[in-house]
Image: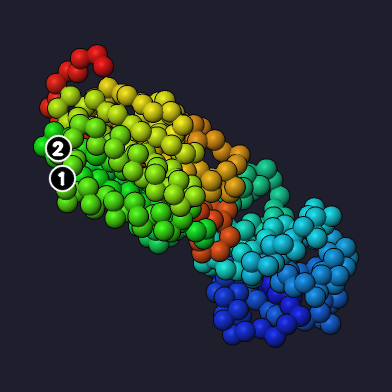
Amino acid sequence: MKVIQCLSGQNKAASLENYFKKLAANVDAEVQFIDWEEAGVYLQSPVIVLLEIEQLDKIKNLIGRRDKKIIIGLNARKDYKVVTELKDFFSNIFGFLDISQEIEYNIPLLKNYLLQNFHEPKSGIQSLLADLEKILDYTKNELLRVRDLHDRFVKIRMDKYKGITLTSKFMAGEKSGGEFFDVFQNENELFFMQLGSNSYLLTSMIISEIELQKEKKLVDASDSFLEQFQKIISFHAQENKAELTYCLMKMNLKNLQSFFELKGLGFLFIDGELYHFGQNLKLKLKPGDKIHLISEGAMKNWELLNPHLTIKSFFQSNKDKDSKDLVNEFFFELTRNKKGSFLIYDAFMSVLEIDQSIIYQLPEDF
């Protein structure tokens, strides 16, 4: 069994030692903690170095002396700011362990580290291919386990309405304000509202306004409800000098004609087309159509945490997934690079799906 040295200049907490023991056990290894005085003896072994600001010079010196790569362990948010100090040594660093994450999150990196750097060579091209296949299979399995953990920790919500199924998911962010949604319908129409603000006060006022409109039953009484409601919440936003984003939708359940009042940086994805929140829409929908909504907060997180993957390419590569799997995949991509327990901004995604069996009238041009 391989021995992994864990190098640290501080006294190790019992919880930290227990974390590394369990992590090592998952890759058929055992861990041994050593201090910097012993570091010279173990230069050729697998090494995990806990990133400590006060030991930065020693870490650089150790990397320079070794002819094998090391792994850096990050244990606090402040550690990430120090990573750039090691940029000249990145070629000798195999990767970074995020100790704030679940053990399962770090297993693939440690497993590949041992296989690629401390695996006894085998003769023959077949043995090499077999090893590569094992690494690939293991990495895929671990990725599925991480996704399963994500699915269990961040629950998905499914709501049924007349002829409509709504699948949605929300994650909280650290910035002030918030995002939320509401759905209600009368005999002939369905109203969907997704709103966001950078002000807790404005968010509270909008929620109160929605409840007031419901009590007055203005939704049932007025064809211009969306326009009136949009004017009211925009007035509140202006009075409080707060930012406001929204998707306000009215769907006629008899002919599936749908109107959208939109504002902000979010997106709608409908029938292969991507629509920015900056433009209002009138659409003729049909049974089986899906309205995918990505909130402004979700987009802000996406651009900061996953800027190399565009929203359109995400939908294209996941077009065959059902609504639940698609939403889960979106949040997996959204959160895979986040630091800490929360996103930066509140994030919301939903899929509003029209039932295939719904009976509707063919709409006239509008």
Under mark 1, the amino acid is Lys
Q: Which residue is painted at 40% across and 32% down in the image?
A: 269
Which residue is identified by label 1? 217
Q: Nearer the viewer, residue 261 or 76?
A: 261
Q: Which residue is painted at 31% across and 24% down in the image?
A: 283
Q: In the image, is 23 to the left or to the right of 36? A: left
Looking at the picture, how far across and down is residue 252, in whole percent?
19, 29
- For the residues labelled 2 and 1, say whether their Cβ atoms are less than 8 Å apart: yes
Q: Which residue is painted at 73% across and 70% down in the image?
A: 51
* Quarter of the image with the N terminus in it: bottom right
How crowded pointer 2 is (Cα within 10 Å; few <14, some 14-19, many 20+) is rated as: few
Task: Name the residue at the front extreme.
Answer: 239
Tell me which colouring the rendered structure shows. rainbow
Task: Name the residue at the top extreme.
Answer: 365
Q: Residue 14 appears in which quarter of the rendering? A: bottom right
Looking at the picture, how far across and down is residue 226, in whole percent?
28, 36
Looking at the picture, how far across and down is residue 158, in whole percent?
26, 49
Looking at the picture, how far across and down is residue 47, in whole percent?
73, 69
Secondary structure under the numbered disc 2 in the rendered image: helix
- Taking 297 as reference, is 283 above or below it? above
- Taking 159 as reference, is 281 above or below it? above
Q: Which residue is painted at 84% across and 82% down in the image?
A: 37
Q: Nearer the viewer, residue 266 or 287?
A: 266
For the image, the number of numbered tags is 2
The residues tagged by marks 2 and 1 sit, at their Cα atoms, a distance apart of 7 Å
Q: Which mark is residue 221?
A: 2
